[in-house]
């Protein structure tokens, strides 16, 4: 029986199907015994699937906050283009 720490080390390979048979079995067993890791894997899968489905940019390419000046500039630009004729 794997410990959570051991499972954690195998998890990426487990999810990608890269483990040898006996390790796969060990991980599968751990997931049945350990709600914590099962939940983690479940959440991980959801995030990966969501990212693949939506083709979201990775988190580090999204700025944490859009600068207010940029927002104002964008709004001003839009108003000019909508209002002007
Ligand atoms: Zn565990």
Image (cartoon, rainbow, N blue to C red):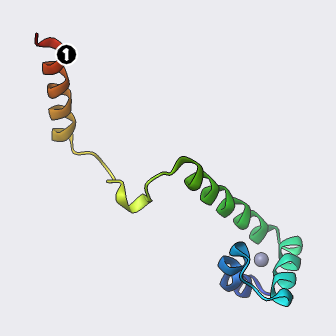
Residue at image point 55% right, 54% down: 51
Q: Is residue 44 placed above or below 55 in the rendered structure?
A: below
| Left or right of residue 11, residue 61 in this image | left
Displayed quadrant of residue 39: bottom right
Location of the N terminus (image quadrant)? bottom right
Task: Give percent across and percent down for residue 20.
Answer: 79, 89
| Residue 76 higher or lower than 5, as above or below | above
Whether the residue under disc 1 has CB within 8 Å of ligand 1: no
Q: Is residue 1 above or below residue 28?
A: below
Which of the image's four quarters has the C terminus? Answer: top left
Kindly indicate the quadrant of the structure image that contains residue 31.
Answer: bottom right
Q: Is residue 43 left or right of residue 28?
A: left
User: For this rendering, which residue is in front, 13 or 32?
Assistant: 13
Q: Which residue is mark 1?
A: 82
Mark 1 secondary-structure assignment:
helix
| Left or right, 26 with reference to 46 | right
Which quarter of the rendered image does ligand 1 occupy? bottom right
Q: Badge 1: few (under 14), some or many (20 or more) residues near its Cα, within 10 Å?
A: few
Q: How many marks?
A: 1
Residue found at the very far top of the displayed protein? 85
Q: Which of the 4 image quarters holds residue 77?
A: top left
Q: Is residue 50 placed above or below 68 in the rendered structure?
A: below
Q: Considering depth in this image, is 6 or 19 the residue closer to the camera? A: 19
Q: At 36% across and 59% down in the image, what residue appears?
A: 61
Residue 29: give x, y in percent of width and height: 89, 78
At x 43%, y 59%, the residue is 59
Residue 83 lies left or right of residue 58; in this view the side is left
């Amino acid at each position: 029986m794997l410990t959570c720490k051991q499972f954690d080390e195998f998890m990426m390979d487990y999810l990608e199907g890269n483990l040898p048979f006996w390790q796969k079995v060990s991980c599968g067993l751990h997931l049945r015994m350990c709600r914590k890791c099962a939940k983690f894997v479940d959440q991980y899968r959801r995030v990966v699937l969501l990212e693949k489905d939506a083709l979201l940019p990775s988190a580090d390419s999204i700025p944490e906050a859009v600068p207010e000046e940029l927002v104002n500039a964008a709004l001003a630009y839009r108003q000019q283009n909508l209002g002007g004729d």
